[in-house]
Amino acid sequence: MHLVVLGRGKTGSLVAEVAHQRGHDVRAVGASQNEGGCALSESELRGIDIVIDFTAPGAVPENIAACLNAGVNLVVGTTGWYDGLPKVREAVLQAGTGFLYAANFSIGINLLFEIVRSGAQAMRHHYSGQIFERHHAQKKDAPSGTALQLQGLIREASGKELEIISFREGEVVGMHEIVLDSPHDTIYLCHDAKSRRGFAEGAVRAAEWLEGRKGFFSFQDVWKEML
């Protein structure tokens, strides 16, 4: 495939590296190269199969609009912009392109999501709980998109709303922990990312899955096929 990776940060750079290793043609674009969406014009995206976005929350709406206008499929790994999801979904369906997003592309975290769906039943048996998430000091959004997704999964499964406690410190890649406590015992469910490579590999696999598809998707659609 011919890919454009938006974002030259730690994760975006690794996504470009992984995509190249998997045999794709990759062009990495930094923020200074995409002022006003200039790198996402129809002429610049001619021949491009997928754009992968790992930028900043404030840049995502403009990047989405540009890709929809150019008719190019888009994978978004940036978080912190989800208030606009309903409008984006409508715009994608009207444009007839392919769009896929995820709070976290890691295989491990998606396994945790499955475990949490079962573990949330503890809330129906007199357990209380909290969600803790730790990320590097440069992360712009808090709580993380992954923590919010965990909170939503527990809410759907149990009807209970767990508090999220966020920490921003040092170079922590990403840690998410659900603690469920009762008078008799405590349950700990935790995912601690050792590196960003799991996120990068998942994002590239999502782009491979999205090639040729039209519609609005999340990584859960990819995950179902992987299972």
Image (cartoon, grey):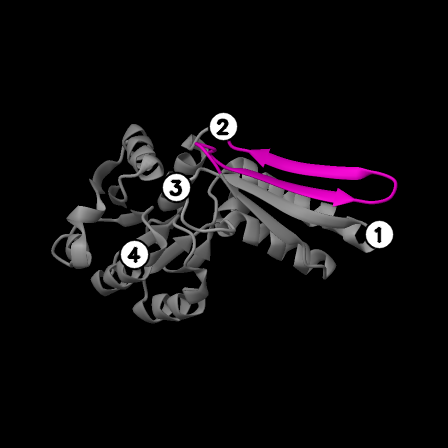
Q: Which residue is denoted by mark 4 in the rendering?
A: 59
Judge whether residue 227 can be spotted in this image.
Answer: no
Q: Was residue 31 drawn as part of the magenta stretch in this picture?
A: no
Where disc 1 sits, the SS reads helix
Q: Residue 213, how many percent across, how many down?
A: 36, 55
Q: Residues within 10 Å of mark 4 (few under 14, many from 20)?
A: some
Q: Are marks 2 and 3 in contact (CB under 8 Å)?
A: no
The magenta span reads: 169-194
In this view, the residue in front, 14 or 94, is 14
Q: Which residue is denoted by mark 2 in the rendering?
A: 194
Where disc 3 sits, the SS reads loop
Q: Residue 225, how many percent across, how many down?
A: 52, 45
Q: Residues within 10 Å of mark 2 (few under 14, many from 20)?
A: few
| Whether residue 90 is situated above or below residue 42 in the rendered picture | below
Q: Residues within 10 Å of mark 3 (few under 14, many from 20)?
A: few
Position of the N terminus, as image quadrant, is top left
Position of the C terminus, as image quadrant, is top right
Going by the numbered disc 1, the residue's amino acid type is His
Which of discs 2 and 3 lies nearer the camera? The answer is: 3
Q: Earlier in the sequence, mark 3 or mark 1?
A: 1
Q: Which residue is denoted by mark 1 in the rendering?
A: 125
Horizontal placement of 40 versus 199: left or right? left
Horizontal placement of 57 versus 222: left or right? left
Q: Which residue is denoted by mark 3 in the rendering?
A: 138
Going by the numbered disc 2, the residue's amino acid type is Lys
Going by the numbered disc 4, the residue's amino acid type is Ala
Judge whether residue 111 can be spotted in this image.
Answer: yes
Q: Are marks 3 and 1 in contact (CB under 8 Å)?
A: no
Q: Was residue 182 drawn as part of the magenta stretch in this picture?
A: yes
Q: Earlier in the sequence, mark 2 or mark 4?
A: 4
